[in-house]
Image: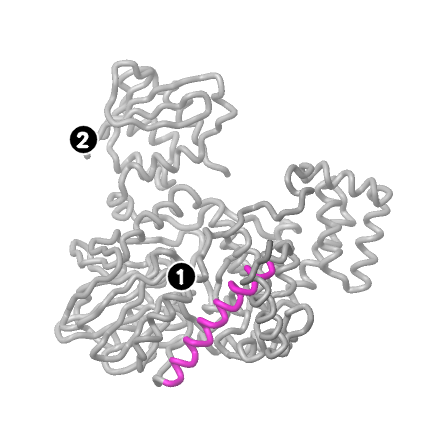
Amino acid sequence: MRKPFLIPLLFLSAWVLAACGHSQSGVPAAVAAPTPQALLAHSEEFKPGVIKVTDGVYVAVGYGIANSILLEGGDGAIVVDTMESVESARKVLAEFRKVSDKPIKAIVYTHSHPDHVGGAAAFVPPGTSVPIYAQEDVAANMDKIASELQPVITRRSLRMYGAQLPPEERVNLGIGGFLDLQEGSTVGTLRPTRTFRDQLEDTVAGIHFQLVHAPGETEDQLFMWLPERGVLLCGDDFYKSFPNLYTIRGTGYRDPKLWAASLDRMRALHPRFLVPSHTRPLSGTAAIDAALTDYRDAIRYVYDQTIRLMNQGLLPDEIAARVQLPPHLAASPWLQPFYGKPSWSAKSIFGGTLGWYSGDPAGLQPLEPTDEARRMVELAGGGAALDERIEAALRKRDYQWALQLSGYALRADQADARARQARGAALRALGGAETNPPARDWYFVAARELDGQIKLPQRIVRPTPEMLAAMPLSIFFDGMAVNLHAEDCLDRTIRTGFEFSDSGERYTYIVRRGVSEVLPGIGEDVDLRVSVSAQDFKEMLAGIRNPALSIATDFHVLKGTKLEFAGFMKLFQPPG
């Protein structure tokens, strides 16, 4: 059967490729990668200071990983994004007070990432409140990070941002100078009070603004448009680096098509001033239009070409090796791979559209990693022979191969000192040559973890009691569920009733053969029943109160014994 439309389409595709001057592989010629010196020069982007963008618009750059923006109105001001901690926010507020002493009348979150919401409490005097504007999904996304993913995101973020590295190993973070979080740092996120789905228009302190839902680095991203001033606050949908279509600390799928469409909506406004929430502001309509267009084109290029290669049957790592920006985009100062990388983005697009299975049948039910490692050691002729191969790779400066081989060696035998030493050397060599800060920092942190010089904590920040008070109890039950030691209760069912004396809420937490369920109310069939204030319960789960002491002093057991209740809560003991 003839397919009349297929042949013309194939002919047209071949003609277009020939006209565009592509190579036979369809891959554009490689452009020289940035050098370590270029990364060092990029640090100028984060020189601390408050920059006046235009009348009444100021941005604080270099006081942490993100920016905070001050909009001055007639009788007050608006703060957009609030830094990563209360401590960093206080530094920024002190600088803003040198510009304006007008009261802050509103806060806007451009999205839910912790470095944009963590310092909000510092901008609001105790005992007062201001409206907190955000897209409607922000609160739920903040809660998920805080309750379910906090330990793993903490560890991976500390590797990616190199917070514990010495100064000689840390250059910059690509989109910020440093992460202002240390053990004991305080977060004071305030919950959004003015939310919207698609668009919101309002006036605060005489400042007329529009908030527009603009999915990009997060699905809850917004941009803020000040039409009378021609000022666009773009959040994290644009900054001076190739965008993080995927971040190595871990993230849900970031849809490049939605991100590019958000940039198209920004381009249509033709702003005179562009103020990102990372890196420095940009002025001039023509320059902004050009930068946003290149940014949008780079995102669509990586997405479209990845899908094209997927349809040709290539595997994720094959696609990652082939997808490179065309020369005019690769040369753009706004698209240097100082944060995201096209190769990482391509693999994320594969996973986000087709899922985890690459298409290679060997990956359907692969060997467990330790079993695979032992077989690879055997294939190499034993541990000593593999160690020789690893050291030979180091001598040849084949550091990636040395890293991969040492992974097999150490998984098979953690006591292999030769492999451990070689792995550390490979990690440091890769880190020293790397110009992408997240990758560079991860290599150096991994080397120091291997040597025992760094031990990553499960958490480094402490929420304020006020922040905990505003969070619903459901978040804390979600946190318990993902910490349940299922293997310790596969043959048990335990029903525990919780009465919260200050809020009047009642719930039954059921552990049923390794699975959690929470029901409203308390039935007569509970095995345990306790009374406690919601605040004490939240502070115990957040680590502000010692669990054993809190159970002994704050909980009143109404059915069962304290020993039995302590055993129940031990089922949810978090890692570390």
Residue that label 2 marks: 504
**Most prominent secondary structure in the magenta stretch?**
helix
Q: Give me the C-alpha separation between circle 2 and circle 1.
A: 43 Å
Query: If you read the primary sequence from the N terminus, does the residue marked by circle 2 or circle 1 appear first?
Result: 1
**In the picture, residue 550 is in which quadrant?**
top left
Comparing 474 with 77, the one in front is 474
Q: Is residue 258 visible?
A: yes
Examine the rendering and report whether any part of residue 30 can be seen.
no
Horizontally, residue 236 falls left or right of residue 15, namely left
The magenta span reads: 286-309
Label 2: few (<14), some (14–19) or many (≥20) C-alpha neighbours in 10 Å: few
The foreground one among 468 and 309 is 309
Query: Is residue 289 one of those drawn in magenta?
Result: yes
SS category of the residue bearing label 2? loop
The percent coordinates of residue 258 (x first, y second) are: 40, 61
Q: Is residue 304 above or below residue 229?
A: above
Which residue is tagged 1? Answer: 258
